[in-house]
Image (spheres, rainbow, N blue to C red):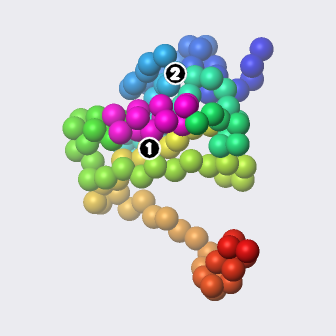
């Protein structure tokens, strides 16, 4: 039996607030939302992360993300949409998924980080480009 939380949601073993579904992708509301309409775009087939998932499924997720953007703008009147996809550290559920977070001008949602640990951009570039 698969112990993956998202696989259980996809199979219907665990109920969800599904806002879109086709043969390959299921989109459901995040039960711990950052904003109204925060949702997860999830392939029905289990992939752990970006290293596992095939390009065709990624394309399908991108196509669905455009549909979700239109849906959320139309129905929730959000001002924008932030997409985030985590791998490894920061990935709570080890089933590939794309977070789609509606943004509102007054949502107060901040992208915070520790600037004190950042290297000079030139040093980072040199590490990556060599």
Q: Residue 111: x percent and y percent?
A: 49, 65
| Magenta span includes 42 | no
Magenta segment: 56-67
Dominant SS of magenta comes to helix
Numbered circle sitting on residue 64 = none
Density class for disc 2 (Cα within 10 Å; few <14, some 14-19, many ≥20) is: few
The mark closer to the camera, 1 or 2, is 2
**Closer to the camera in the image, 55 or 109:** 55
Helix, strand or loop for disc 1? strand
Q: Residue 40: x percent and y percent?
A: 50, 36
Check disc 1 and report the residue beneath it: 100
Where is 125 relative to 63, above or below? below
Residue at the spot 38% in from the left edge and 26% down from the top edge: 19
Residue at the spot 69% in from the left edge and 80% down from the top edge: 126
Q: Quadrant of residue 36?
A: top left
Q: Residue 25: x percent and y percent?
A: 50, 25
**Closer to the camera in the image, 66 or 35:** 66
Give the side of residue 109 with respect to residue 80, left or right.
right
**Closer to the camera in the image, 76 or 49:** 49
Q: Quadrant of residue 13?
A: top right
Residue at the spot 75% in from the left edge and 19% down from the top edge: 2
Q: Earlier in the sequence, mark 1 or mark 2?
A: 2
**Closer to the camera in the image, 19 or 87:** 87
Report whether residue 41 is seen. Answer: no
Query: Separation of disc 1 and disc 2 at Cα?
Result: 17 Å
Residue at the spot 68% in from the left edge and 83% down from the top edge: 123
Helix, strand or loop for disc 2? loop
Report whether residue 65 is seen. Answer: yes
Numbered circle sitting on residue 24 = 2
């Amino acid at each position: 039996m698969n112990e993956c939380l998202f696989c259980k949601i996809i199979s219907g073993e665990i109920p969800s607030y599904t806002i879109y579904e086709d043969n390959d992708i299921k989109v459901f509301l995040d039960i711990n939302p950052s904003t109204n309409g925060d949702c997860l775009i999830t392939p029905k087939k289990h992939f752990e992360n970006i290293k596992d998932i095939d390009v065709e499924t990624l394309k399908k997720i991108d196509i669905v993300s455009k549909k979700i953007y239109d849906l959320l703008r139309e129905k929730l009147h959000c001002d924008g949409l932030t997409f985030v996809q985590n791998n490894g550290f920061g990935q709570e559920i080890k089933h590939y998924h794309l977070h789609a977070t509606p943004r509102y001008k007054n949502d107060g949602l901040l992208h915070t980080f520790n600037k004190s640990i950042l290297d000079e951009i030139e040093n980072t570039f040199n590490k990556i480009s060599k």
